[in-house]
Amino acid sequence: MKGGHDLGGVQGMGKINPEAENLEPVFHTNWERRVFGITLATGMLGKWNIDESRHARERQNPADYLNNSYYENWLVGIEKLLAEKDLLVENESPPKLRVPNVAEAKKILTSGTSSVLKTQQPPAYAVGDSVNIKTSNNKGHTRVPGYAQGATGIVIAHIGCHTFPDKNAHDEHVGEHLYTIGFTGSDLWGAHSENVEVLIDLWEPYLTKASNAIAQE
Amino acid sequence: MTHDHDHTEPPSDLELRVKALESLLIEKGLVNPETLNAIIDTYEHKVGPRNGAHVVAKAWTDPEFKIALLNDATEAVASLGYCGRQGEHLKVVENTNDVHNLVVCTLCSCYPWTVLGLPPTWYKSAPYRSRAVREPRCVLEEFGTRLDSTVKLKVWDSTSEMRYLVLPQQPAGTENWSEERLQPLVSRNSMIGVELAHLSDDSNEPQS
């Protein structure tokens, strides 16, 4: 979905105004600290995956997404997931779930979760191939940024097979080939753009072979 | 405001909303309060950009480690004890005299937690996420970083579970320094790519 979160290339957002690195706290308020902890702790219940979690934050009116602070969007996401998975029904005991203790949680954090997921299909593209990024009308979760859709890029690397987020967010687990695709500034923003190469990791279903006519332009 | 006055000011609506959620989760047995505190403590106090500075300083002083790091960062970084969540698939991109790398996540806030900890607010903000891919040189200038026009700029948009860490250039004049002495020169921002690694705060002229 092209929601408020899909920010690459949006104009008019103003200056960055970074806080000084040595002065910025990890959390700015106590509730941010708790939202962060709650999100990770409830994630360990195994009732949803990282793409469902991202999608829960993205499924908002874009105006709300942009008005909320970062951890407010996390809070919206976690409240939504808990409600949708029926974990907070009043006067009802939640299903028996494995709730990790401190040692188990630390093990989960230090081992992480690999996103590698094999497919039987050979990769359709090779390094150096010219590819077009499909325009997406997907109303669900996707990781192809709006600014890359319709653009032509070059395959810089084949990363391997990784869980395809568009399906993973909707509880279907398949692996797809993942590539790093390189774009020139002019591919993305027109002839007067800054001299830059933008590299985006894109899954095979987002891509189609570029026709020569487009590649030569 | 970053100043903590919780004991005198009434709690905000958000503070109350989050407190209610936390209480409910604990009451229903869905969250272990000790686990919750341990998770917060891990990312507030233990996992942070000093991990990344260790990795970079080692790469500056140990050529074999640097080759291993550029070849398979996940494995090389794990050999120093840094592994886990949001660092499962790590790639290190090297700055040189000809290439400068910058990392962003335009769709959310993907960031290599194992080596940098949690991202700063600006990294997650709409201005950075929108502009880093479109006008990165303007973005760098807001951080006081001016690159020569001949330097090729590469911007990595973290759209997959790959996480990117920039290996900044070692500051000139520190060639014989030890790894321990070099570590403080490696700022978090230099490993995101918005700044260069410097000898000190007042030496932030672009490198030739």
Image: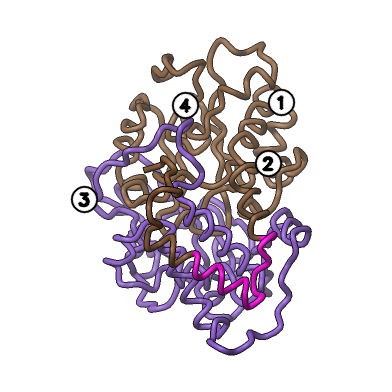
**Tag 3 and tag 4 share a subunit:** no
Q: Is residue B165 left or right of residue B138?
A: right
Tell me the quadrant of the picture where the N terminus of chain B can be found. Answer: top left
- Three-letter residue code for mark 4: Leu
Question: Which SS class for mark 4?
Answer: loop
Closer to viewer: mark 1 or mark 4: 4
Please tell me how crowded label 3 is: few (under 14), some (14-19), or many (20+) other residues with Cα within 10 Å.
few
Chain holding disc 1: B
Looking at the image, tell me whether mark 2 or mark 4 is earlier in sequence order: 2
Q: Is residue B15 left or right of residue B149?
A: right
- The residue that disc 1 covers is B63
A36 to A96, vertically: above or below: above
Tell me the quadrant of the picture where the C terminus of chain B can be found. Answer: top left
Q: Is residue A167 visible?
A: yes
Label for residue B71?
2
A106 to B146, vertically: above or below: below
Residue B106 in picture, x, y percent from top left = 40, 54
Determine the main secondary structure of the stretch shown in magenta: helix
**Residue at left offset 48%, top offset 30%:** A22
Q: Is residue A213 visible?
A: no
- Three-letter residue code for mark 2: Asn
Chain identifier of the purple chain: A
